[in-house]
Structure formats: C-alpha cells, structure tokens
Image (cartoon, rainbow, N blue to C red):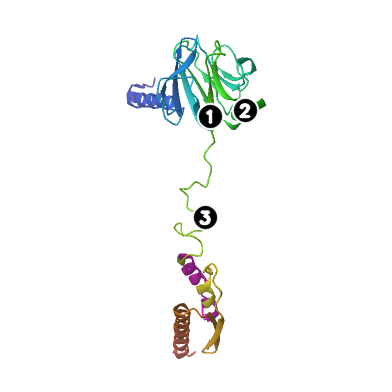
Amino acid sequence: MRSWAGHGRLIIPLVLLASSWVEAASDYQIVLNNNSILDYRVTSVSSPDVYSGALPADDPTLNLQVNKRYAFTVVNASAHPFQVIAKGATAAEDVVLLSQGPMAGSMESDPGITWTDDGQSTNGVVEFTVTEALVQQMNAGGRVPGYRCLVHASLMRGNFTIIPAPTEGSPEGIPEGSVEGSPEGSPEGSREGSVEGVSEGSTEGMHEGMHEGMAEGEGETPAPEKRIRIFGCGVSTHDRGAGGSHDVLVTIVFALLVLKALARRSNTPTPRSE
C-alpha cells in the first residue's frame, strides 16, 4: 500500500491555501448585530466603499457595486434573518429576493448571484454577487434596493445604493491613436506623418508627408500657395516666413541626396560577361 506520510508537508499548505481562498471569495464583508428589535446595527465593514460613516450605525444606507460579491455576517441570525428586497413604501409592499433562514427569495436560484447561506443560528453568513439582473429586480415596480429582517420587517429595514460596474475608457487609459497622450495634430503627429509620407526619389511625397497631421490655427487665414521648381520638380509651399523657408530648405537637401545617390549608381562599373 502506498504511504502518504511523505506528502504531509505538501497537503497541509494546500489545505490552508484552499481555506484562505474560500474566506476571500467575497469582495466585501459586513457584520450586522441588532438594536433590540428596532434596527440592524452595522458594527463592522471591510471597506469604506460599503459605508464610510461612523460605526456602529443603525439601518444605514449601504453601497453595493455591480459584479462585486458581498458577505453579511448576522450575529443573531436565528432571531433576525437577513433579507435582500425590492423595498416598497411599507413592509407589505416589499418583494423578497434573497432570504436567510427558512424562507426562500425569488432570485436565490440565479447562477450569477450564487446565493449561499451557511445555516448557522449564531454568526450566520450569507453571500451573494450583485448582478444586473438582481439590480433590475430590486428596482422593479417603482421599488428601491433595500434590506430587512424577516421577523421584524417593518422596523429593521434599510436601503442599498447601487454603484455601476466600472466601464472601459477610464481616465487612466491613453486615448487610442494618440502619442504618449499628446493631442492629434501635435508636433509628434506631424513628425510621424513626415516619415510615412517620404517615398524613394519623390520630392512630392516628402512635401506631402511634412504637412500631414498639421492643423491650421483657429481663425488663421491660409497663406497663398507658391510653387518653385527644383531640378525640374514642381514643389508647392505656403509662405509662412521662417516655416516656409524651412520647407524649401528641407526639399533642396532631399533633392541633393537623391541626385547624389543616382550619380553613385551611374558611376558603378557594369560587370562584363565572359
């Protein structure tokens, strides 16, 4: 028979890891005690995202975020079973969606919500995930998201505020198509356009690339276009003082480089065939 004695060191850490994973299954944890039969008394929250006021607090409004999972520990669960409801103006108008204890809520079988109830009479824990479907049911019929005690429904009751799930395109992201967050038409964009616009032996391509991505200033009247000829090539430019002179100078340099390359090619001796 195979012995597992040698695997003890491996099994124990795995068990501890599994138990810690189960405990961390919920994103937020809330502890509910009670003020007699009058109120649920919140004594602990795992994050101010749930409730940022002073504790303990009686029947406070708690924040729930869509797609997050919540664990409620009810100190006296047998006497004050916790329920998630579509809250009406009175307890008689409430609709029970999730319920601790013997009563079943209408949304408990939803696989996205994954409702769990450990069944403990003291420090009983229920967990659920806030889904869009659950939120829709909380608001159905003009009601609002809320919670209450099964036994003392008209007294121990409070509200939830629903926080939408984060959406894509948050401010942390860099806008698509920008360069290191710089706006379109910035100098970075114009330099990129100048590289893409250059084609071999084409001064027209270079000229077009240099002006690609450059925006006209607000309220500025376009300067008259001038055409010059460099080595037989027609080149257009705008009269912009120093900017226009720079365009012409770059074009002349590029043309000289092209001519130099063509001269080298023509001076290369052609191999003679045997």
Res 129 seen here: no
How far apart marks 2 and 1 lie (CA) works out to: 11 Å
- Residue corresponding to mark 1: 161
Seen at 54% across and 89% down, the residue is 232
Dot 3: element: loop
**Numbered badge on residue 139:** 2
Q: Are marks 1 and 3 in contact (CB under 8 Å)?
A: no
Q: Main secondary structure of the magenta part?
A: helix
Query: Which residue type carries mark 1?
Result: Thr
**Mark 2 crowdedness (10 Å alpha carbons): few <14, some 14-19, many ≥20:** some
- Residue corresponding to mark 3: 176
Query: Which residue type carries mark 2?
Result: Asn
Seen at 49% across and 60% down, the residue is 183
Task: Please tell me in which quadrant of the rendered image residue 43 appears.
Answer: top left
Residue 29: x %, y % from top left: 44, 25
Q: Are marks 2 and 1 in contact (CB under 8 Å)?
A: no
Chain part drawn in magenta: 188-206
